[in-house]
Structures are given as C-alpha cells and as structure tokens.
Amino acid sequence: MVHEVKEMERLQKVIAQAGITSRRKAEQLIIEGKVKVNGKVVRELGVKVTPNKDEIEVEGVPIDREEPVYYLLYKPSGVISSVSDDKGRTVVTDFLEIEQRVFPVGRLDYDTSGAILLTNDGEFANVLMHPKYKVEKVYVAKVKGIPSREKLKELQNGIKLEDGMTAPAKVKMMSLDKKKNTAIIRIVIHEGRNRQVRRMFEAIDHPVIKLKREQYSFLTLKGLNPGDARQLKPIEVKHLKELAVTKPS
Ligand code: URA
C-alpha cells in the first residue's frame, strides 16, 4: 500500500488518533516517560513526528497508525453497532470492504436503523462522542398510540429517566394514523445515552415501534439505501472537526 507523504504532527495527537486514549491522557503518558519514538523515551510535549514513518511505542506497545478514513453508513435494522459479535450476527463493519480497521462512532441499537459514522480516527470519535460538544442527532420514531401535546411538551422540556433528566429536545409530530393507533414523531437530541429515545417515549407511555436516525449533525442519509456507505468528503470531515472546536458548552 502506498502512503501519501504525511506532514509532521504532534506526538500526543498521533497517539490519540490511533484510538489508544484521549489527547490529554496521551500527554500524561508522555510526561510519565511511557512513550518512545524510534526507540527513545520522549518526555517533552512539543515533539512532532511523521505518522507511518516514525516508530511510536506507548507503554512498550507499538502503535499501528493507518491513514485516517471516515465513512457514513446507513445501518439497516438488525445489525450490531460493533466490529465483531460473538453470536455471529451482522455488524456495522461488515458493510465496508476496506483494509482499514474502522469502528463505529457511538452506537445505534440492534433494531434502530440510520446514520452512523465509522472511522479509524480515535481522537475524532472521542471528540464527537463527548457530551460537551452536543452533536445533534435527528431521529424519526414510530410510536404506539397518539401522544398528546402535553406529553410531547414533556419530552421537549426534559423528562426524568432513571439516569437523570434529559436535556431539552426538539419534538415534532409528523403524522398520525388513528386506525392503527400510531404516530410518527421527529425528535432531535444531542445526548447519547443508552437507548435514550426509546426510554424517553416509554416514559410518556408511548413505546417506540420503529426507530431511525435520519441525521447525524449535518450528515443526512440522502442518496443512501440501507446497507450503503459512503466516504465523507474532506470538507465534511473538516466541518465535523470544527463543530467540536466551536461548540463547547
Ligand atoms: N436512542 C435509542 O433509543 N436507540 C438508538 O439506537 C439511538 C438513540
């Protein structure tokens, strides 16, 4: 494989991008003398390295840094958001025939379909998943029953779940089917708690029948069918990285 010539980058950034740890923890490891570059311990934070050329070891283990890649997958329902499954079920990485070892940024439930990012850039993933950056996620839920205005308002204002109050959400009724006694609701949240949307609707007694993530930040599923993935454009990667820089709480 031919690697393009890479510019030098800060050691802590390269370690973080390898997905081993956060940039801050990488700095700590450097200060503690646990990082070697080309066989020599480096304790200064200003050091720059050339990825894929300089040999970096963290606590005695060489880091294997690939060219960072970024994909948007339209995850079908019935797929695990992981890189492997001990029960042999389909996982999100099965949809990408690439040599890089990517992993999902966060997760969607087995039964949830929709937009999910896959990357081998650990730092990018850590940053996007950090609650303080409030990346918006747009979900469309088909729910049992037809929620009243008051109940939707509760979701909008924040609702008590067993792990605490949810942050305010944008909630909109899209359509309802009186005969089938179901409703389609669009909900925008920026938290990423486990099964959050399902638990929010359970809390107002309208359990989710079907759930799809239509949008992750500004990335939509436009042009994709379930199981399709596309590589992000460099400008999209740049914008996602900027979101993290410009939107701390
Ligand atoms: N909320 C859920 O309940 N499930 C998902 O998969 C994503 C958000």
Image (tube, rainbow, N blue to C red):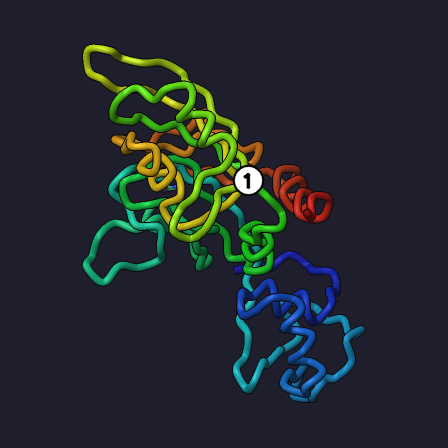
Q: Which type of secondary structure does the marked residue at label 1 adopt?
A: loop
- Indicate yes or no: mark 1 CB to ligand 1 under 8 Å: no
Q: How many marks?
A: 1
Q: Which of 61 and 82 is in front in this view?
A: 82
Q: Which of 234 and 222 is in front in this view?
A: 222
- Asked if residue 200 lies left or right of residue 59, the reply is left
Binning the other alpha carbons within 10 Å of mark 1 as few (below 14), some (14 to 19) or many (20 upward) gives some
Q: Name the residue under label 1.
A: 232
Residue 215 visible in image: no
Residue type highlighted by circle 1: Leu
Quadrant position of residue 214: top left
- Residue that appears at 66% across and 47% down: 244
Residue 163 visible in image: yes
Quadrant position of residue 223: top left
In the rendered image, residue 202, in percent from the top left (x then y), is placed at: 31, 37
- Asked if residue 116 lies left or right of residue 127, the reply is left
Residue 20, relative to residue 41: is it above or below?
A: above
In the rendered image, residue 216, in percent from the top left (x then y), is placed at: 51, 37
Residue 177, relative to residue 198: is it above or below?
A: above
Q: Nearer the viewer, residue 75 or 244?
A: 244
Q: Nearer the viewer, residue 62 or 173?
A: 173
In the rendered image, residue 150, in percent from the top left (x then y), is placed at: 42, 22
- Residue that appears at 42% across and 25% down: 152
In the rendered image, residue 138, in percent from the top left (x then y), is placed at: 48, 31
- Residue that appears at 29% across and 30% down: 206
- Asked if residue 41 lies left or right of residue 79, the reply is right
Q: Quadrant of ligand 1?
A: top left
Residue 113, relative to residue 65: is it above or below?
A: above
- Residue that appears at 63% across and 72% down: 25
